[in-house]
């Protein structure tokens, strides 16, 4: 295992070069699905498969099943890639009546998505890019390239051993969270005065090697502070935050602290940050503090920052502000016939949810279809009105916002637009609570239908 955590404080050390460049040969798969019968009917019925392999055809990862047992299937995929490359081209996609197969090649790694969903080729390729970035977040792009330059048939599973759940978790959350589709990050609704006070506490605790500080509650961004010397154009992108959040979700720890290396590919794909991660409210473990440093040896200095932040939070009872936050429901907004909506303002990154988890996942497919049509490179649209059997859907994009909404089935286009105008007025009124305007990445808001169902969430892009 190339990641080690100490027993006393849960710190991690990551040394890719020590174990990656010496031994060769095949590494036995330890996936939880190792006994899954490959090519069985149940395996085929999954709506979306994702495969990762090397240019030499060595299997690296499969979302379902044992990648070792799928080596012949991946060999066929690599043969297709090589055949097209031999003609001076690069394979992009294959379409059939029921499936879309999308290829993405990044350096020595090949990614393949086989999907029976309604997602477009561009959306599937973007998901593969997220998978690539998640692998880079653990190894860095420079390390991956250097390893395969030395040994083209290297088995990358050596370095990713034990990290399958990280990739599994990323793919699972992309199937249920529209913030990936919108390139946005979810934010916790909070009065601007409370959010400013939390940010001020984080800002006061910054040390010279501390670059970013994040406060997260229930996978929603509460506050973010960036060290003043970091350039404006070097801000973190939503994709980097998704990777960071996913690594935290995949971590088994709850009590104690973690000190682990993480590469943020869209910030710098060849270097590590060192992330200090600790929950501030054990045993509930819903409020998480993440401090990113550039110094590998700064664990104790960063831990001292955390202690100062905890003391300041305790003196102001700040964690109670987060615990008492009021989530939004569709029936709080007084918009007729509205069941659910997503909203992303152009200048920030947030979104709202207001349906049961099952219903939100079901709606994600038609939302993705409308998103693809709205952002089509050949014929982009500004407004889509679609009446289906169970609901009426509307997508609306302007220079100031992007919105997707679900209404009851019999709502007319005129009525839907009229009600969305009311909704926009409500969002404008509540925007200080819904969005983080001080940080320049996109946000979205997603809604819930009624208080008997699930809760509202905010997202920051």
Image (cartoon, rainbow, N blue to C red):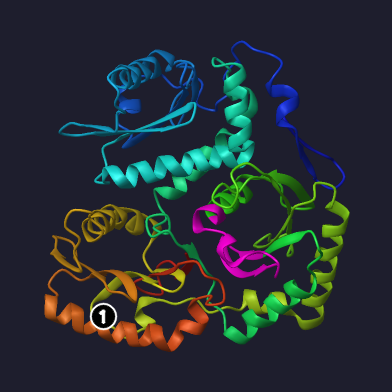
Label 1, residues with CA under 10 Å away: few <14, some 14-19, many ≥20: many
**Residue at (66%, 67%) from the top-left corner?**
226
* Front residue of 263 and 410: 263
**Residue at (57%, 20%) from the top-left corner?**
29
In the picture, measured across the screen, residue 134 lies left or right of residue 11, that is left
Q: Quadrant of the N terminus?
A: top right
The residue that mark 1 highlights is: 420
Residue 188 at least partly seen? yes
Residue 161 at least partly seen? no
In the picture, measured across the screen, residue 394 lies left or right of residue 162, that is left
Count of residue discs: 1
In the picture, measured across the screen, residue 259 lies left or right of residue 215, that is right
The magenta region covers 214-241
Q: Is residue 141 magenta?
A: no
* Front residue of 171 and 157: 157
Where residue 428 appears, as percent x and y from the top left, is 40, 86
């Amino acid at each position: 295992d190339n990641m080690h955590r100490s027993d006393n404080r849960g710190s991690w050390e990551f040394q890719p070069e020590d174990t990656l460049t010496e031994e060769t040969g095949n590494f036995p798969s330890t996936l939880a699905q190792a006994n899954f019968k490959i090519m069985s009917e149940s395996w085929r019925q999954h709506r979306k498969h994702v495969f990762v392999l090397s240019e030499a055809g060595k299997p690296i990862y499969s979302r379902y099943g044992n990648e070792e047992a799928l080596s012949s299937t991946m060999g066929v995929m690599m043969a297709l890639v090589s055949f097209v490359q031999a003609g001076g081209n690069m394979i992009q996609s294959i379409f059939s009546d029921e499936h879309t197969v999308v290829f993405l090649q990044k350096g020595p790694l090949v990614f393949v998505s086989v999907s029976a969903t309604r997602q477009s080729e561009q959306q599937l390729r973007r998901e593969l890019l997220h998978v690539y970035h998640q692998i880079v977040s653990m190894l860095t792009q420079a390390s991956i390239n250097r390893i395969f330059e030395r040994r083209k048939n290297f088995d990358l599973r050596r370095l990713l051993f034990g990290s399958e759940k990280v990739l599994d978790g990323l793919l699972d959350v992309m199937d249920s969270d529209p913030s990936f589709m919108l390139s946005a990050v979810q934010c916790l609704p909070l009065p601007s005065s409370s959010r400013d006070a939390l940010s001020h506490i984080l800002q006061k605790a910054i040390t010279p090697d501390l670059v970013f500080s994040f406060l997260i509650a229930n996978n929603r961004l509460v506050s973010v502070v960036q060290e003043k010397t970091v350039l404006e154009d070097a801000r973190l992108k939503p994709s980097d935050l998704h990777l960071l959040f996913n690594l935290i979700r995949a971590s088994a720890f709850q009590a104690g602290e973690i000190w682990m290396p993480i590469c943020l590919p869209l910030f710098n794909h060849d270097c590590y940050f060192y992330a200090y991660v600790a929950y501030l409210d054990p045993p509930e473990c819903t409020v998480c503090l993440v401090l990113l440093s550039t110094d590998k040896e700064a664990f104790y200095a960063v831990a001292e920052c955390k202690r100062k932040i905890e003391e300041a939070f305790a003196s102001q009872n700040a964690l109670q502000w987060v615990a008492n936050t009021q989530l939004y429901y569709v029936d709080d907004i007084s918009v007729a016939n509205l069941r659910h909506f997503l909203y992303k303002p152009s200048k920030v990154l947030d979104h709202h949810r207001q349906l049961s988890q099952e219903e939100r996942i079901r709606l994600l497919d038609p939302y993705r279809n409308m998103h693809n049509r709205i952002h089509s490179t050949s014929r982009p649209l500004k407004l889509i009105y679609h009446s289906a059997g169970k609901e009426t859907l509307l997508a609306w994009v302007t220079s100031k916002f992007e919105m997707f909404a679900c209404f009851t089935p019999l709502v007319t286009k005129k009525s839907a637009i009229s009600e969305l105008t009311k909704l926009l007025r409500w969002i404008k009124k509540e925007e200080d609570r819904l969005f983080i305007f001080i940080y320049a990445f996109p946000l979205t808001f997603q809604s819930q239908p009624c208080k008997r169902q699930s809760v509202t969430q905010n997202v920051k892009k």
